[in-house]
Image: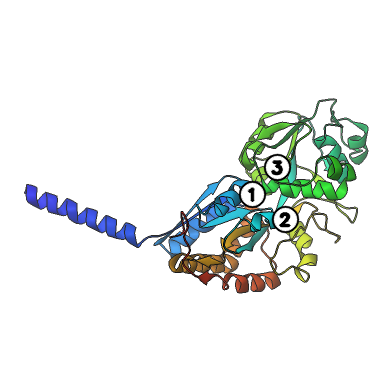
Amino acid sequence: MKSSLIIKVLFTLLISVSASADTKMLTGAGASFPYPIYSKWFAEYNKKNPDVEINYQMIGSGGGIRQLLAKTVDFGASDAPMRERELKKSQSPIIHIPTVLGSVVVSYNIPGLKESLKLDGAVLAKIFMGEIKEWNHAEIQALNKDAKLPQKSIVVVRRSDSSGTTYVFTDYLAKVSPQWKKTVGTAKAVRWPTGLGGKGNPGVAGQIANTPGSIGYIEYNYAAQNKLAVAAIKNAAGEFIAPSTQSVSMAAESFVKTMPEDFRVSITEPAGKGAYPISAFTYILIYKDMPKQKAAVLRDFLVWAMDEGQKMASQLSYAPLPKALVKKVKAKINGVNEKPIKTASLQ
């Protein structure tokens, strides 16, 4: 009986080891901005392809780019396109795959305020530079004439880590405020003049939720999840626009025809009416040359994301890619080569 039991245990272990050996693994790391939809995608793709597991670490866009360049992951993720100096550090060409459109929203916690807050770029820049310090400041009140704003100190909340969300937000502020462009600039990490730091979109959302009088910037899904108020932002056409899948799609439409071949583009402060001004593409970053098996799996997943994945975008407060762009992205995905390269992860 003991021998029979031992044989059964060994047989079960052999089956388990065999199943594990057949599992195709992909690892990625990067932005927290697209984490909600990527988690959904990876889970749904696994249901249709049980032999494929995709693991993703939410460490910020800067961290994702660093790990990709260090070749410790199969793909990176960033809301900020990689810069030329970053691309030159890679031994193999890196491809930017836009996956969905999202918005960076300005969330706030003002106890007692019943009206929706309206803000423009100039006032936002002054708030995040620490120049406007109270909620009933004349410049905020002028944009919200019917609102009863409290005489309460403003607490700025911003990212403490290297972040694509920060890149998108500071890119917008640099376009609407010459002073911001000169003194702070645009980057995944900047020297903030003021504010409390939070790690990742979840960290900033948590700080806003727990700090009366606070204001911060986060990806829209995190505001929705935490039931945080979001401001309507004045766009280039002079309209106060709230973030929505429609207003984010409007921001992208005018860029599709002139989209660069590598898809690296900023769509903040677009000219069109109805467009939300702090919108962005988010990207999966992949090597053009990859080992055969991983290349095949990653290509299949990304094509699935262009077809089935896009249908899930609006459920999680993202906007799907314009159909004309999807066709171009698929062509780029099919350009991934099956070529062995020596890396820490891709082997």
**What residue would you read off at disc 2?**
280
Q: The disc labelled 1 sits on which kind of residue?
A: Phe
From mark 2 to mark 3, how far is it between C-alphas?
Answer: 17 Å
Q: Amino acid at mark 3?
A: Ala
Foreground mark, 1 or 3?
A: 3
Look at mark 3 in the image and give the residue it sits on.
189
Relative placement, left or right, of 3 versus 89 is: left
Report how far apart the C-alphas of labels 2 and 1 lie in the structure: 10 Å
Whether residue 120 appears in this view of the structure is: no
Residue 114 coordinates in the image, percent (x, y): 79, 36
- Per the image, the residue denoted by label 1 is 33
Split into 4 quadrants, where in the image is the C terminus?
bottom left
Q: Quadrant of residue 282?
A: bottom right
Q: CA distance from mark 1 to mark 3?
A: 15 Å
Q: Judging from the image, what secondary structure is the residue with disc 2 in? A: strand
Whether pointer 2 and pointer 1 mark residues with C-beta atoms closer than 8 Å, the reply is yes
**Crowding at label 2, few (<14), some or many (≥20) Cα neighbours within 10 Å?**
many
Q: Secondary structure at mark 1?
A: loop
Amino acid type, callout 2: Ala
The residue lying at 87 percent from left, 36 percent from top is 147
Residue 89 percent coordinates (x, y): 62, 55
- Specify which label sits upstream in the sequence, 2 or 1: 1
Which residue is located at x 69 percent, y 39 percent?
228
Of badges 2 and 3, the one in the foreground is: 3
